[in-house]
Amino acid sequence: MSITETRSAEEPISASTDPGDRPRPAARRGARLYPLAMRLHFYAGIFVAPFILIAALTGALYAMAPTIEGFVSRDLLRVDTSGPEQTLKAQVDAAVATKPELTLVAVAPAGSDGETTRVLFNDPVLGDSERLSVFVDPHTAQPVGEAVVYGSGGALPLRAWISEFHRSLHLGDFGRLYSELAASWLWVIALFGLVLWVHRVRKRRAKRSAQWLLRPDLSEPKRRKLNWHGAIGVWILPVALLLSVTGATWSTYAGENISAVRKELNWTTPSVSVTLPGAAEPAQAAGSDHHSAGHVAPAPVDQDARIAQLDGVWETARANGITQAAEIAIPATPEQAFGVKELRKPGTYSIDSVAIDGASATVTDSLAFADWPLMAKLTNWGIAFHMGLMFGLPNQLLLLAVALGLCALIVLGYLMWWQRRPTRKNSGFAVGAPPRRGVLRRTSPWITVPLVAAALLVGWFLPLLGLSLLGFLLVDVALGLAARAKNPV
């Protein structure tokens, strides 16, 4: 998938007279799309690749963040004690005693032997999606430390910092535009690069195309960078496309459009209702401390009574399909039930949830992952994979390999582009020339018209891609006008 193979489709690839090197009819048919793919791949590669390179480098770190967190924060996440576990009430009471001024919002019981229990509080000084967690040894009911955790995945400060670094370079909303631009263009560059690579392989190795799509041709010393570039691109293509799609769901502008489409098509992630039967009006989500403006403030919750109900709630949840590590949301109002939802962790491929009336320890609502809409399931799996949490360490190592492969692709592309610059004396500073102009005029309307329509649609749905594509077009037109003025016919 070459960024810098700048010769036109009409030029021969080599001077070889081997009949096996001559273009086959299929290759000539593929050449109709080749010039357009080359020009778009070239411009996008030159101008967008730096953003993708940054995303790949930070993504390599992000991919290993869960493992790094487990190592760095082991004293909070793991304990060496053994024996029977204390009651949840005893564990939560111990945590509350260290933070009596804060509001208890959730409890995540220890998921397996050696793990700590997380007791989560709302702290008004923290930011959005941040909570304070007190970590408790489940065997001794003694707190072992505390830390701010972020998001539904409960990322500790280091992983949260790495996550934000990957998403925005810690530059706020403006910084998020870089990652959105990278995610929006990655799949375009990759797919057009695949078109170029398939075209080249079919011309050079027509009898063994499937094999040579995956193998770099090392018999051409002058083209080894190109051949490695194409082969590596094919290797990482499926994962790169998945990362591009899932990354776009977190973006600012494209993410809003994706959310709107999901809502319209009923693809959003469902949730259980935590409103108790017979409640006068719908309650806020369990554990929330935000209420709609103009509503009368709800009656205060007896926190001690809720803590006393935790063991019964947890036992009921375990008996009703909650078999993996989960978080118990403490009701924020008397009209609410406890919400118990399984957490996104390595090896967890389904997320079940139930709502339980704390007073009677009975289930008031339940939602099995099997009942989620298909697109909601795929979204959940894609996000878990992107975060390196779906398959644990193997997932993270695969993402690391793809990120490093993407970096290698970009570096090879720029090296090829640089090496194609004019080197004659008196040529001054120069870089690799773009592919031949006029590709739209030479491309069949049966290809051009659908592509233009698709570009308009995709550009509306992915605004940064559309605006940058328009920018490439304006630059291309300006360069053409400048060249015409310099060398009038």
Image (spheres, rainbow, N blue to C red):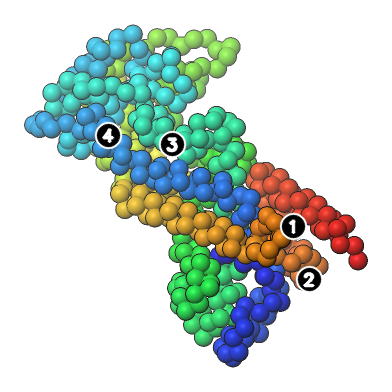
Residue 65 location, quadrant: top left
Residue 44 shown left or right of residue 212 in the figure? right
Dot 4 falls on a residue whose secondary structure is helix
Q: Residues within 10 Å of mark 2 (few under 14, many from 20)?
A: few
Inspect the image, locate mark 2, and give the three-letter code of the amino acid beneath it.
Answer: Arg
Residue 145 shown left or right of residue 443 in the figure? left
Q: Residues within 10 Å of mark 4 (few under 14, many from 20)?
A: few
Sequence-wise first label, 1 or 2: 2
64 or 421, which lies in front?
421
Query: Residue drawn 49% across and 82% down?
Result: 208
- CB atoms of marks 3 and 4 within 8 Å: no
Q: CA distance from mark 3 to mark 2?
A: 45 Å
Sequence-wise first label, 3 or 2: 3
Where does the image place residue 8, in percent across and percent down from the top left? Answer: 70, 71
61 or 29, which lies in front?
61
Q: CA distance from mark 3 to mark 4?
A: 16 Å
Q: CA distance from mark 1 to mark 2?
A: 18 Å
Sequence-wise first label, 3 or 4: 4
Q: Give the label, 4 or 1, closer to the camera.
A: 4
Inspect the image, locate mark 4, and give the three-letter code of the amino acid beneath it.
Answer: Val
Q: Residues within 10 Å of mark 3 (few under 14, many from 20)?
A: many
Inspect the image, locate mark 1, and give the three-letter code of the amino acid beneath it.
Answer: Ala
Query: Residue drawn 26% across and 41% down?
Result: 323
Report the quarter where the C terminus lies.
bottom right
- What numbered label is drawn on residue 453? 1
- What numbered label is drawn on residue 442? 2
**Where does label 3 land, which residue?**
163
Sequence-wise first label, 4 or 1: 4
Query: Residue drawn 56% across and 34% down?
Result: 175
Residue 136 location, quadrant: top left
**Where does label 4 land, which residue?**
72
Sequence-wise first label, 2 or 4: 4
